Image: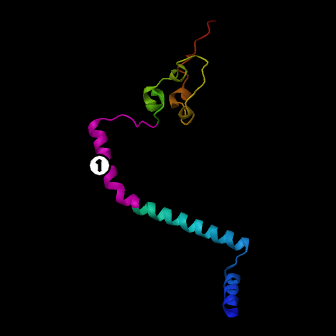
Amino acid sequence: MKGEAQWVQDMLRAFSMRKADLFLGSMALGIALLVLSFVDEALRGRAAVPGIERRAELVAALDLTDLALFTEARYTRHLTQADGHTGFQDHPLGLEHFPSGSLYAPPGILSETDELRPQTEIPD
């Protein structure tokens, strides 16, 4: 019995780790899993190319417009079909009450030119 208890204590001492060893081991495992995820993506990406090409042909054949990213409101479902005022349709000072409204930027045309407020010439 004494020899068996000593063996158990020796095994526990051999497998006891410092906190730094545990941290380094978990970091090494995390880095290995990250590398494996990139390898997996590369392998699956090559295998998915024919399916993606088939879907692209289907979209072109059916003349589909854009992807519906959000399901909350009609102006967030189809971003190309919304104007700049639909988020404030209930009240002019109403705040955006859908979270998806804060996840996409305004259309580029609104930041490039100010079409909502055209500039007028000041007479001499």
* Residue 46 quadrant: bottom left
Q: Residue furthest bottom?
A: 3
Residue 73, image x, y percentages: 47, 28
Which residue is pictured at 39% across the width and 35% down the height? 66
**Quadrant of image for the N terminus:** bottom right
Q: Residue furthest left?
A: 61
Residue 118, image x, y percentages: 55, 16
Give the main secondary structure of the magenta stretch. Answer: helix
Packing grade of label 1 (10 A; few <14, some 14-19, many >=20) is few
| Total labels drawn | 1
Q: Which structural element holds mark 1?
A: helix
- Residue 57 within the magenta-colored segment of the rendering: yes
Q: Residue furthest top?
A: 124
Q: Is residue 115 above or below residue 52?
A: above
Q: Is residue 20 above or below residue 79?
A: below
Q: Is residue 69 above or below residue 10?
A: above
Q: Nearer the viewer, residue 107 or 101?
A: 101
* Residue 96 quadrant: top right
Which residue is pictured at 73% across the width and 71% down the height? 19
* Residue 32 quadrant: bottom right
Q: Amino acid at mark 1?
A: Arg
Residue 115, image x, y percentages: 52, 20
Residue bearing mark 1: 54
Q: Is residue 97 left or right of residue 81?
A: right
Residue 24, image x, y percentages: 67, 71
Q: Is residue 28 left or right of residue 115?
A: right
Q: Nearer the viewer, residue 51 or 124?
A: 51
Q: Which residues are magenta?
A: 44-69
**Quadrant of image for the C terminus:** top right
Q: Is residue 46 above or below residue 76?
A: below
Which residue is pictured at 68% across the width and 93% down the height? 3
